Amino acid sequence: MKTILKLATAASVLVAGSLVFSTSALAANCPVTQSLSSFMGNTAGCVDQDKLYTPLFTDLPASPSSNVEISSFGIAPFEFHNISVNPVGAFTAAGIYHFDYTIEIVGPSRVFNALSIDSDVPALAPDVKITKLIDFDGIAGGPSITLTSLSGTPALASIPSTYTKLWIYETIRIDQGDAAGSGALNGFTTVYTQRDTSIPEPLSIALLGLGLAGIGISRRRKST
């Protein structure tokens, strides 16, 4: 997970010139790292490249303190945008928690294409389940998809290539003391993939495969 973020931070410097668009004057640029309380307190949201992140709600434990890391990089015609929550220590308090926000493309000729979730769960404390509801229109009962990361297993889904704003509702369940063992969470990351619609679709599909392969390689490097 952190390897992906480091790659994103370095690569974003190289591609920043081609990714910057006019964005909301009310939203400041997202720091690469900020406290969870700062992220949630900024009701106008923050902008990373052409992405506007706006907080909705969280009840994640106040202890340990947590950081939100936001970064991006591009492999034309794709761009990869990462948001990660990393506690200083680990979440170990049993319970059900939430982390909700919206992510919106504010630049032209871009649509969401896919997303993945990955969680960092210790092998000795695997009893953690993260469920992500991705709502496409912000209306209850409207079109949506759900991804689940169980005991640190990543998950990936494609997104119909018509959406430029997503409502994200994450539920984090940490269990302790049952037959399966305790639960602890060192952090969790979502990678959003967007596509440049001005490039023909067949080439886009091929390059998406290369991009996802690169994410897999980064994950394997992280675990070694």
Image: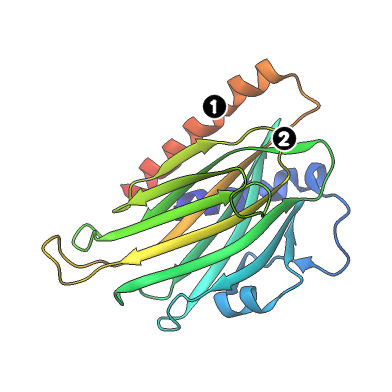
- Residue 66 is left or right of residue 69, and the answer is left
Q: Position of residue 211 (x, y in %)?
A: 55, 32
Cα distance, mark 1 to mark 2? 22 Å
Identity, as a three-letter code, of the amino acid under mark 2: Thr
Q: Position of residue 52 (x, y in %)?
A: 74, 58
Tag in front: 1 or 2:
2
Q: Earlier in the sequence, mark 1 or mark 2?
A: 2
The part of the image, by quadrant, that contains residue 111 is top right
Closer-to-camera residue (217/99): 99
Q: Position of residue 117 (x, y in %)?
A: 46, 49
Query: Residue at 15% across / 72% down in the picture?
Result: 177
Closer-to-camera residue (201/18): 201
Q: Is residue 67 above or below residue 199?
A: below
The part of the image, by quadrant, that contains residue 57 is bottom right
Identity, as a three-letter code, of the amino acid under mark 1: Leu
- Residue 105 is left or right of residue 114, and the answer is right
SS at circle 2: loop
Whether residue 180 is visible: yes
Label number found at residue 162: 2
Label number found at residue 210: 1
Neighbour tally class for label 1: few under 14, some 14-19, many 20 plus, Cα within 10 Å: few
Query: Residue at 49% across / 65% down in the picture?
Result: 85
| The residue positioned farthest toward the front in the image shown | 141
Query: Residue at 40% across / 48% down in the picture?
Result: 148
SS at circle 1: helix
| The residue positioned farthest toward the left in the image shown | 179
Q: Is residue 40 above or below residue 194?
A: below
